[in-house]
Amino acid sequence: MVRWSSFVYGGDDKGRSSRRPSQKNLSPFLEEEEDSDSREMESWEHSQDDHDDEDSLNSDEDELCSIESSVSSLTGAGSKKGKPRRPSPRKKELRKGRSKKPAMSASEEKVEMQDIERGAKDPLVVPFPAAPEAEPRTERSSKFAGVSERLKTMKSKLSFKSETEPNELKRSQAARNSQRRVYYFWGTLALVVFIAIIAGSVVIAQRRGGSNDEANEIIPPTADDVQIPMTNREQALMDVFETVSAVGLEDEGSPQFKAKEWMFHEDLLKLTPSATVPAQRIAQRYALAVFYFSTNGTETWSTHNWLKGDECSNMYWTGISCNEDNEVRALAFDNAGIEGTIPEELGTLTMLENLVLKNHPRLGGKIPAGLGELTVLGQLGLYNNALTGGIPNELYSATHLNYINLQNNQLQGGLILRIEKLRNLERLILFNNNFSGGLPMRQLARTGIRFLGLSNNNFAGSLPEQISNLPLLEYLYLDGNAFTGVIPPNMGRLTNLVSFNFDHNTFTGPIPTELGSMKRLEYASVQQNSLSGEIPTEIASLGKLRTLNFGINALTGKVPDLSNLSSLKHLHLHQNELTGEIPGSLSQLLNLEVLFLSSNNFEGEFDQIFGAANLKGLYLSDNRLGGTIPAGLCELDALRALFLDTNLFSGPIPECIGTLTDLRQLFLFSNKLTGAVPNSMGELRKLTGFGIENNNLGGHVPEGICTIGSLNDVWADCGGQVPNILCSCCSTCCPSENCS
């Protein structure tokens, strides 16, 4: 039976046990060869028996010679003068193990055995004399008889071995040949299977690896894989690096590893920690190198002079400013192609006062907690990037901070109570992120906050009354959140407030009259809330007010006298429920640029608002204004947008409107206008939008209007079976399905 241990380890048949292995040890795929293998094993065992029988034959022949000698001595036959008979050459060959006997055929062996039996040839056979008939049996004769019997037995055994030896030898040789064929067959089969498995593994690895074939390639160890001990200089540098970086020094491909290798082998300064080169100097250069590799400086930066010369040299390392002690005090990049992440190692720059990385849409990751170690950091500007996560708690340990600008990122979380530790904080700008929660006004009151910008986040809840405890507050922007409740009346205590914006929240209730105490107020906007009540007359005392936006609320009543707002440029009261006439006091607002009174319930005529020579936008749509369009409008030379649609105006379109050469938008639709469209309107060469539909105008639209190159939106009553007006360039003719 084939043993796989012999095949695998290159062994042979020598020394194997002749015990037949049990069937349960055979492999399943060898069961079909069980019968033939059994026969081969039997042949192998018989061949072993042949070797044993051959040794036995030699010993038996020796014994036979000994017996015959004894017989000769007993009978005295075959000897002369009492000397033993000399053995024949045949006997000598038997005594030598028959090693020199030539091979005989089966027929020769058979004839020889017959001769031996007859005693004709074999010299070992001695004829016995006939015993006397009358002689009694003696002890000597009895002993001779026993010897004779043994001699016959040995002759018979020799005869059997002579007849069977050739056949057994042939069977043994056949068994060996068969066994070799079995070895060759299973060995070849195993080799083929092994090669197939290896080939399949390679194909699978290539398919799984894809483009990463190099990563999946098995590379034998080389001399480069052996870790080479660091030099004394490298070990000294490594000791410094380990105090700066907690991870990455042994991670091949990491920014820390690249910075380490650069300082080991490529840095031209070849710095070594010593009495003249302190460890902080090494740490500073290493931290900047980590920043360079972490933000893909080798590929995307717009500047390429880093990693050259001294970092505090004016010739190299753009974006860095140092103090007199060659310590980095400022690191600033604006739209410089920076991407990747900001590394924690910047926390090693202990003398850093300003860190500004802005306008890098591919700069992501979290704000490093290590920045909290910068105890002299005053300005932190990480805005218009793609940063994620929240403000790390460690940052509140940088108590020297007075400016934090994180606007336009993807940050989240809330303002925690630890913000009170930033006693020097003056400006906190978090516009356009995903911050949430309430405002810790009590804690903010313990800072020096002057600018609080939280627009377009998810802050919610009511506005705490503690807002009045921010006496230094100048700018407050809470628009675009989810604040509810009333605007706290004690907000009027913020006498230093210059600007506030509460747009796009859900504030309710009236506008506090206390707002009239904010004498420094220049910008006030509460657009798109749910405020109600009348506009406080106290608003008129805000002489520095430039923008007043109470649009999209539920305000009622009349517009108070605002003539004292001499600095007012933008007045937005649209989409409320205001009533009455448009006050003539508005004509005294000489600096007014935009008057937005659309979508209210104003009525009557207006002809006393034309003192505002700088007026650029007049929006009176969707009211109940009537009468004729006053010719005084033609005095507004700076006018760019005139919206008088959806009112009750009647009469003709003033001819002088053609003198408003800066006009871009003119919409007079949905009134009761009559007459023809003035030809002078063809002089409005900057016009982009023109609408006169849903009126009683006739004639045709002047060709001069149709030749205005910028005009692409013209609506008129040129539709239906009998058009009221003819128009060759109208984009929409009414009535039609396109008119609404």
Image: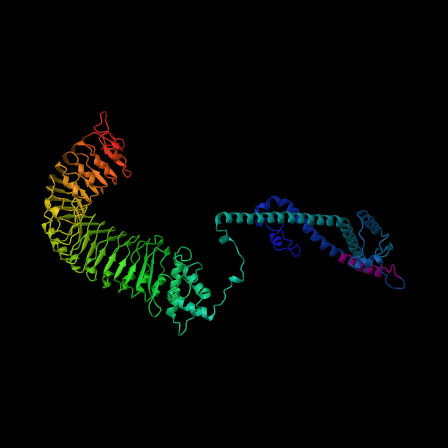
Residue displayed at 73% across by 50% down: 169
Of residue 137 and residue 256, the one placed in the foreground of this image is: 256
Residue 5: x %, y % from top left: 60, 54
- Taking the magenta stretch, the answer to whether it contains residue 69 is yes
Q: Quadrant of the C terminus?
A: top left
Q: Is residue 366 left or right of residue 211?
A: left
Instruction: Please identify the residue farthest to the top as the structure is shown.
Output: 721
- Taking the magenta stretch, the answer to whether it contains residue 523 is no
Q: Which residues are magenta?
A: 58-79
Residue 309: x %, y % from top left: 42, 65
Instruction: Please identify the residue farthest to the bottom as the structure is shown.
Output: 275
Q: Is residue 229 left or right of residue 532?
A: right
Which quadrant of the structure image shows residue 467?
bottom left
Tell me: residue 616, above or below residue 425.
above
Of residue 319 and residue 413, the one placed in the foreground of this image is: 319
Residue displayed at 17% across by 35% down: 653
